[in-house]
Image (cartoon, rainbow, N blue to C red):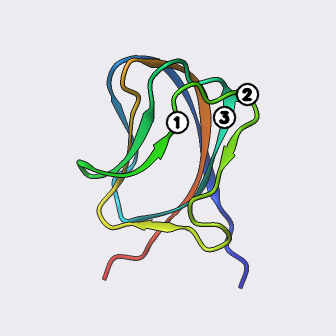
Amino acid sequence: MIREWKYRVLAISGSGTTTINDVPTLLLGVYVNIGSGSARIHLLDDSSIVYRIPANSTDGDCYAPGRDVGVRFETSLVVDHNSSSGEIVLQYDDLERS
């Protein structure tokens, strides 16, 4: 069976966190629509940093930490936009609860 991925477009401005998914999640990748500014963007599993998108990412950058299979976030997928600006697209899917 082929997995159909969900996506979320996230406009970022100022500091804060945004919950993308509040259940266990598989993240396929992140695409930068509009550059991320001078601060990193952190992808969190609950409150633990799992992946960082580098500061000054530019339009069109693509980060695929999980390559073709995805990275497992055990509790949730949260974006900490840490005083940056821009727009990103996250490709993800829910994992079944055990």
Mark 2 touches mark 1? (CB < 8 Å): no
Secondary structure of the residue carrying tag 3 is strand
Q: Is residue 74 left or right of residue 4?
A: left
What type is the residue that disc 3 sits on?
A: Val
Mark 2 touches mark 3? (CB < 8 Å): yes
Which mark is drawn over residue 32?
Answer: 3
Q: Residue at x 61, y 74 (%)?
A: 69
Q: Residue at x 32, y 24 (%)?
A: 16
Between 76 and 63, the one nearer to me in the picture? 63
Question: In terms of image quadrants, where is residue 65?
Answer: bottom right
- Alpha-carbon neighbours of circle 1 within 10 Å: few (<14), some, or many (≥20)? some
What type is the residue that disc 1 sits on?
A: Pro
**The N terminus appears in which quarter of the rendering?**
bottom right
Alpha carbon of mark 2 to alpha carbon of mark 3: how far? 5 Å
**Relative vertical location of residue 5 with respect to residue 46 in this rendering, above or below:** below
Numbered marks: total: 3
Q: Position of residue 70 (x, y in %)?
A: 56, 68
Extreme residue in the top direction: 14
First in sequence: mark 2 vs mark 1? 1
Q: Position of residue 25 (x, y in %)?
A: 43, 63
Residue matched to label 1: 54
Which mark is drawn over residue 59?
Answer: 2
